[in-house]
Image: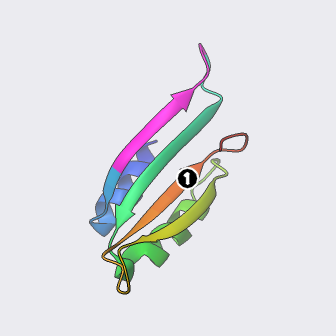
Amino acid sequence: MKQLLTVTRSSGANLYGWWTHGKPAIDIVNGIIHAKPNVAGKIIQDLLTIDKLPLKVEGFPLGTINPELIEIRFSTPGGR
């Protein structure tokens, strides 16, 4: 999670929310990041290279015609 926060903060993006599933051990982590279009690609690249944390990453533009933000959704294997 520390690496995830570092990626988000270093790019000026907003970690909109993250959720864990599984007790007592955490099995799945899901989350959403809102980022400006000019840094979204770098964030996705950084998320895919976090050590020892395989993530599924998806991006979706928010806004019509010219997206103002990109919603980046991430989850560990087994997440939605």
Q: Position of residue 11 (x, y in %)?
A: 32, 68
Q: Which residue is mark 1?
A: 74
Report if residue 18 lies within the magenta region: yes
- Residue closest to the far left: 12
Q: From the viewer's side, name the closer residue of 48 and 74.
A: 74
Q: From the viewer's side, name the closer residue of 53 and 37.
A: 37
Q: Determine the secondary structure under disc 1.
A: strand
- Residue closest to the far right: 78
Report which quarter residue 76 is drawn in. top right
Residue 6 position (above or below residue 17):
below
Residue 49 can be seen, yes or no: no
Which region is colored magenta? 16-24
> Which image quadrant: the C terminus?
top right
Report if residue 20 lies within the magenta region: yes
| Amino acid residing under circle 1 | Phe
Residue 3 can be seen, yes or no: yes
**Left or right relative to 68: residue 72:** right
Number of numbered discs:
1
